[in-house]
Amino acid sequence: MSYVARSTMVAARMLGDEMVIMSGKDSTLFTLNPVATVIWNAADGRTTLEEIVEQKVCQEFEVERATAMQDAESFVSELSEHGILLVSESPIVT
């Protein structure tokens, strides 16, 4: 079980229907698609990635849970490598 939280070391803004995030660590810019934006907005450190996928992603988008989970894990892994998202096996307090 993985908990995810947004890093406080980033700048994030909605531009139209896309979330744009800049890493404070290396100034890398990320543009999130609508599914990734849902995950980003739900990443509060108290909700598991599995819950986010089941309660948010699968509810808002027509996608199978297994596919959504695989894509979400890849997305979270990539952003955690850049310090954009924090991942932990226990709830995260920011």
Image (cartoon, grey):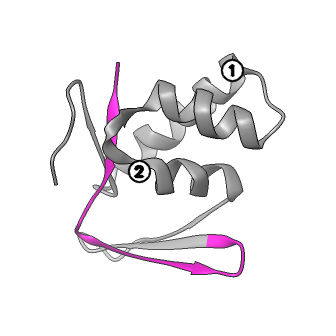
> Which label lies toward us, 2 or 1?
1
Report the amino acid beneath label 1: Arg
Magenta region, main secondary structure? strand
Give the residue displayed 37% in from the left and 35% down from the top: 47
Residue pointed to by mark 2 = 79
Report the amino acid beneath label 2: Leu
Q: Which residues are magenta?
A: 1-18
Whether the magenta-drawn stretch holds residue 81 is answered as: no
If the image is split into quadrants, where does the N terminus sit? top left
* Above or below: residue 61 compared with residue 94: above
Dot 1: within a 10 Å radius of its alpha carbon, few (fewer than 14), some, or many (20 or more) residues? some
Dot 2: within a 10 Å radius of its alpha carbon, few (fewer than 14), some, or many (20 or more) residues? some
Q: CA distance from mark 2 to mark 1?
A: 21 Å
Tell whether 13 sits left or right of 60. left
Q: Secondary structure at mark 2?
A: helix
Question: Residue 87: x, y in percent?
Answer: 28, 37
Whether the magenta-drawn stretch holds residue 3 is answered as: yes
* Above or below: residue 88 compared with residue 1: below
